[in-house]
Image (cartoon, helix red, strand yellow):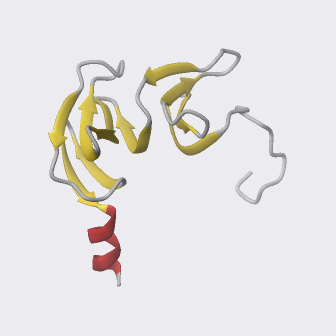
Amino acid sequence: GLNGENAAMAFDVNAKQFVPMDGVFYYIDAGDGQIKSVESDSAPKTVVAYPCSGFNVNHYGFFYTREVDGKWVCCSADSKGENEKVIDDSVTSPRFMACMLKESSLIVGEEKFRAAAQ
């Protein structure tokens, strides 16, 4: 329940960030930084094979931040983690807060998000 009673382990993975969606548990693996997915009674599958710093997922695909040629870029990929597109290569923060609207997104760097919250 919501009060923590009758808790049961759903997935045993080493996740540093996660998003559950439609019975699938998406997460950044704390060991290799890759985005992976796992469903009940199945082994984890790699979805994005690059070390990522932050991510979000919706029915249209993935939005994540990773390092390319020594700088952080924000990328999108389809729902299978394929067809990667760099959507912002002028970023300074390794993590982003992404508000996703259908197939587009509003991306706010973590440092700007913190400044706005202060």
Q: Is residue 24 visible?
A: yes
In this picture, residue 79 sits left or right of residue 47? left
In this picture, residue 60 sits left or right of residue 25? left
In this picture, residue 47 sits left or right of residue 68? right
Q: Quadrant of the C terminus?
A: bottom left
Examine the rendered structure and indicate whether residue 4 appears above or below residue 67.
below
Query: Residue 30: horizontal and vertical position, in percent?
Result: 60, 40
Task: Classify residue 56 by image quadrant.
Answer: top left
Examine the rendered structure and indicate whether residue 88 appears above or below residue 51.
below
Identify the residue at image location x=80%, y=39%: 8
Extreme residue toward the top, this view:
42
User: How many numbered discs, if any?
Assistant: 0
Identify the residue at image location x=22%, y=53%: 107
Identify the residue at image location x=35%, y=22%: 81
The residue nearer to you, when weighing 109 against 24, is 109
Identify the residue at image location x=15%, y=52%: 90
Q: Is residue 22 visible?
A: no
Extreme residue toward the front, this view:
70
Examine the rendered structure and indicate whether residue 65 appears above or below residue 59.
below
Query: Residue 16: horizontal and vertical position, in percent?
Result: 58, 46
Extreme residue toward the right, this view:
6
Query: Residue 25: horizontal and vertical position, in percent?
Result: 56, 32
Query: Residue 104: horizontal and vertical position, in percent?
Result: 16, 40
